[in-house]
Image (spheres, coloured by chain):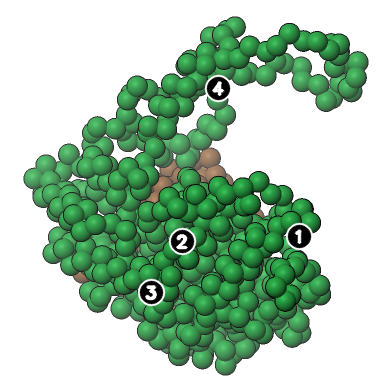
Chain colours: A brown, B green
Amino acid sequence: MAANKEAFLYTKEHEWIEVKGETVVRIGITDYAVDQLGDIVFVDLPETDSEFIAEEEFATVESVKSTSEIYAPVSGSIQSVNSRLEDEPEVLNESPFEDGWLVEIESPEPFSQEGLLSYEEYQNYLSELED
Amino acid sequence: MKNYNSLIFEISQPGRTAYSLPKNDVDTVELNEELPSHLLRSEEPELPEISELQLMRHYTALSNKNFGVETGFYPLGSCTMKYNPKRNEVAAKMSGFSAIHPLQPTNTTQGALQLMYELQEDLKEVTGMDAMTLQPAAGAQGEWTGLLILKAYHAKNGEGEQRKKILIPDSAHGTNPASAVVAGFDVVEIKSNERGTVDIEALKAAVGDDTAGLMLTNPNTLGLFEKDIAEMAEIIHDAGGLLYYDGANANAILGKSTPGMMGFDVVHLNLHKTFSTPHGGGGPGSGPVGVKLHLEPFLPVPRVEKEGDRYVVSSDYPDAIGRVKGYWGNFGVNVRAYSYIRTMGPEGLKQVSESAVLHANYLKSRLEPYFKTPYPQYCMHEFVLSGSNLKKHDVRTLDIAKRLLDFGIYAPTVYFPLIVEEALMIEPTETEPKEMLDEFADAMIQIVKEAEESPELLREAPHDKSVRRMDEVTASRKPVVVYQK
C-alpha cells in the first residue's frame, strides 16, 4: 500500500513522521534525503527499548558519499526497528516512505506536532533549497 | 603491463619459487612434538608461488599505477598535497637520526633530542602556544590527545562530570566529532550561517556550564576565515569552556596569524600537510599538539627538556595524561618537518601561505563563471565549488571527478564539506606553477562544456585507466576483504 505522504509530518533535517497512534510514531527519511545521500550501503539502527530525547542522534545512514546522523524528532523509547535494513540497506533507496522506514518511537506523552512541518510546508522548504 | 590487474595469488604456480635456501645444516625439529596442538596450523598457509622476475614485475606494475604529487597535480582539498622537498629525505637518512634506538642512553642521542626540542620551539612560535608534544602519530590522534588534555583540565577543576559537551560546527572535518566521541564527550553540532562561517547566535544558544569546549578549523573547510573568532573565543571562555584548533588548514596562516592569537587553548598541527612530509599512502603522519600555559601540566610524557646545554628526558608530571604513542611518535617524519622549517625560515613560511592563498583565489576566479559558488567572498588556501549547476545534464560531481582523471589530474575532494551540495573542494597549494593552475582550470572548463554537449563522456569516465568505474556500492554493501579462490 502506498504511503499517504501528504498526511506525514516532516523536519528540516529531511525526516518524515507518520503518526501511528496517540503516542506512537514511525520515522524515516525522505526521498530528497535519499537522493542527496546516493546509494546507501549501511544503516545503523538503535536497540529496541533504548531511549532518546528529541534532537538526539539515534541512527546513522552511510552512503558511498558520506555518513549522516539521524536525529530523533520526538522524545521516547524505541518500540521497533526495521531490521530488514541491516541486510538490505538498498531498500531505503528503493522505498524511503514505505519499506525503508527506520524506527517506531513510543513517547511518554501524547504526540505533538509542534515544530514539525506539514507536507505542504516541507515542499515549500525544498523549493527554497533548490533556489 | 598497463592493463595488468592480477592479484599476486592469481599468478601463482605450484612449486615455483623466488628464493633458494642454503642446505639445512641443523637438526630438523618436529613441531608437533615441541608445541601444543592448538598452536599448530592444520592446513598449509596459502602463499603465492612465483619467480623473482614475476615478483618484480608484479610490484613494479603496481608502483606504476601510483599517483602522487610527483606524477601530477593533486588538488585534494584540506589535504595540502604540496611537494615534499628531497633535502628532507637526505636529513631523515642521516645515521644520527635513522640508525639510533629510542632506548639508547640520552648522552648518545643528544642530536636527536636537540632536534625534537628545537622543533617543539619552532612549532610553539608557529602556533602561539606555550608548550608542545611531538608524540601524536597524525591529525586525528592529535585531536584525541588534545581532547584528553581538555578533559583532564576540567577534571582537575572538579568539573569533569559536568562538562561533557564539545561544540563542533557543521563544516568541520569528520574526524572532529569522531575524536570527541572516542575521548568520551557528547557532540553538539553548530550550524553555519549563509556566509559559510559559524553562526554566532547558534553558538551562544548552545554554550553553557556543560560546555567542555569548541573544536574549530580556521580557516574552515570552506576555505573561509572565521572572522568572528575573537568573539567566539570570548563566548566559550566566559562559559568556562576551552577552544581546540584543528590545524589541518594551517597552510593558510603561517607567519600571518596564530591560533594562540585567536584565543585557542589547544592546537594540533598536521606536519604531513603544512610542513611537507609525505602522506596520502606515503605516510606516516605526525600530529604534534600545543597548549597554552594553563594546560601544560596535562601534556603527555615523556618530554624533552633542556638543562644548561644538555637535552634530557623527563616524565615527572603527575597530572600528565600519560603516553599516547610508543617512544617519540613518528620521529623520522618530525626530522623532515624540521628540515623544511629550517630550510624555509620565517620569511619563507610566510611566503608559503601567501602563495597558497593567491593560488587558490586565482583558480577560484577562473572557475567561478562555470560553477555554482556558494560563498562568493575571497577564500584562503582552498575553496569550494558546487557542481549542482550540471545536474540538469544528469551529470554529478562524481562524474566531473572521474573525468579529471583522464586529464592526468587527481580529483579534488568531493562531497565534502557536507553543507555544500555536490561539493568540489580544491586546494592547489603553493608549490604549483601558474602553468599547472591554468592547465587544471582549462580542464575543468572543458569538462563543463562536455557536460553540456556530450554528458556520457563524463558519466563513463575515466576512459584511459586500467580500471574504470568501481562498483563502490556492492563493494560497500557486500565487501570481500579476504582473497577467495
In whole angstroms, how far apart are the C-alphas of marks 4 and 1? 50 Å
Of the numbered discs 4 and 1, the one sitting upstream in the chain is 1
| Foreground residue among A63 and B461 | B461
Chain for numbered disc 2 = B
Chain for numbered disc 4 = B
- Same chain? Circles 3 and 2: yes
- Same chain? Circles 2 and 1: yes
**Residue A85 position within the rendered picture, expressed as x and y whole percent measured from the top left:** 51, 45
Of the numbered discs 3 and 2, the one sitting upstream in the chain is 2
**Residue B328 position within the rendered picture, expressed as x and y whole percent measured from the top left:** 67, 58
Image quadrant where residue B381 sits:
bottom left
Of the numbered discs 2 and 1, the one sitting upstream in the chain is 1
* Residue corresponding to mark 2: B340
Badge 2, how many Cα within 10 Å: few under 14, some, many 20+? many
- Same chain? Circles 4 and 2: yes
Q: Amino acid at mark 3?
A: Glu
Q: Amino acid at mark 2?
A: Tyr
Mark 3: secondary structure = helix
In whole angstroms, how far apart are the C-alphas of marks 4 and 2? 45 Å
Residue A29 visible to an observer of this rendering: no
* Residue corresponding to mark 3: B347
* Disc nearest the viewer among 4 and 1: 1
Left or right of B304 in this view: B373: left
Badge 3, how many Cα within 10 Å: few under 14, some, many 20+? few
Q: Amino acid at mark 4?
A: Gln
- Quadrant of the image containing the N terminus of chain B: top left
In whole angstroms, how far apart are the C-alphas of marks 3 and 2? 13 Å
**Residue B349 position within the rendered picture, expressed as x and y whole percent measured from the top left:** 40, 70
Chain for numbered disc 1 = B
Mark 4: secondary structure = loop
Mark 1: secondary structure = helix
| Foreground residue among B232 and B328 | B328
